[in-house]
Each structure stands twice: as C-alpha cells, then as structure tokens.
Image (cartoon, grey):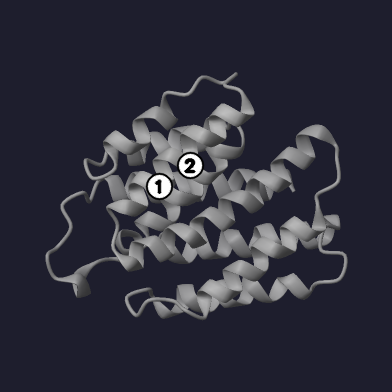
Amino acid sequence: MKKYTLLLILITYVFAVNVSAQIKLPKNETQHTAEQKMLPFAMAMSLSVLGEMHDDNYLSVLSVFQKLPHWSAELKPVTEMSKDTADYKRLDISLTATKALRAKSNDSDKWQMLVGEQFGTIYALIKKSRLSNDSINEGDLKFNLELIGILAEKAPIDIPWNVTAKFKEIGKLKGTQNATSDANIEKIISEVKNILNIISK
C-alpha cells in the first residue's frame, strides 16, 4: 500500500513539474501534449486532497500549479493554509477555490476538474484510513468510483481516448465485492498510478 501511494504522489509531482515548464501552450489545440490537456485534472486532484487533509506531498504539487498565472490567485489561499488548519475551514477554503476556478473554466476543464476531485477524494479516504487505522467507508469509495465511470461516459472529445478508457475501467471497480480489502485497495491505487503514468507521457 505504502509503495503504491508514494509512487502515485511522485508521478503526480513529476507531471506537475513537467507541465509547469510548458506554461506557454501552443495555440493549436491539436499540438497539446497529454500532460497539457489533462492539467486541470491533476490540479483538481491535488486541490481535492488538500481540502480533505494536510498532505506535504500534495501541497508541493499544488504549489507548482499555483505558479501558473491562470490559477495563481485562486490557489494561493489553499497553498497558504497551515498544517493545523481546522478541517471545516480547510474544506471551506478549498471549495471556495474550486468554485472560483470552475467559474473561469471551459466545459472540458470543468469536466476534468470533476474527475480529478473524485480521484483526490479516493486518495484522501485511503490515506485517512491508514493514518487512523479506521475502516474505509465502502459506500463512499464506491460512490466516487461510480461517479468516475459516469463522467467517463460523457468525456469531452478533446480528452485523450486512452485516458477516457482508463477512467471507464476504474469506474467498473464500483462493482467489486469487498472493495475496501487490502488487495482491492492496492488494485485501485495501481489503476490510478497507471492513469497518471499514461497522462504524464
């Protein structure tokens, strides 16, 4: 479990750093790399995690995104939250940023953000469970998996087909028996890792 989690964070971080070096995107949409096209997804995933809990690694990731001019002002309050910010306040700051970012986003970016938020929530569910030794709420986990699948069926045409296909595969995991077992949690994390690998190429 731990090795998958660390790898997932590393891939997300590398993805963020790679994209931050490509701030000047080509005017022709067809020239965008998968990384560039999926930037809102990775940003929203990181934002979702930090809305649920403090995480040094995802804070580093979001700090990279915060350097991008298009999102700088909205993400600043999130990146400036202290480690001991109360849960209710953390969530409120994150939701305020999310609302502001959606207001300035096109339909495709909004879709990416919705999917990214589900991935962030899944990560937070797993991480909180490991930190507290409490069971993961299987209903919550399956809800997020199902929502990813539903959103994948309505993917905008500019989303890379192989990414959409992987989103659909993850959505199917909602039907897994005993979805919160260690083996199935590792499978979910492995699938998320695969998606981030695909996006970061």
Q: Amino acid at mark 1?
A: Lys
| Mark 1 and mark 2 residues within 8 Å of each other at the beta carbon | yes
Give residue 165's position: percent from left, percent from top: 52, 79
- Callout 2: 10 Å neighbours few (<14), some, many (20+)? some
Q: Position of residue 92 (x, y in %)?
A: 52, 34
The answer to whether 37 appears left or right of 43 in the picture is: left
> Which residue is disc 1 drawn over?
99
What residue would you read off at disc 2? 95
Image point (43%, 31%), residue name:
78
- Could you say which is closer to the camera, residue 29 or residue 121? 121
Left or right: where 24 falls relative to 93: left
Depth order, front residue of 38/191: 38
Image location of residue 118, percent across then percent down: 58, 57
Q: Quadrant of residue 85?
A: top right
What kind of residue is marked 2? Leu
Distance between mark 1 and mark 2 Cα atoms? 6 Å
For the question of whether residue 171 can be seen, the reply is: yes
Vertical order, 58 against 150 (above or below): above
Please state the horizontal and vertical placement of residue 6, each as a whole percent of the image: 61, 43
- Considering depth in this image, is 87 or 67 the residue closer to the camera? 87
Q: Residue at x 28, y 63 (%)?
A: 106
Residue, far left: 27
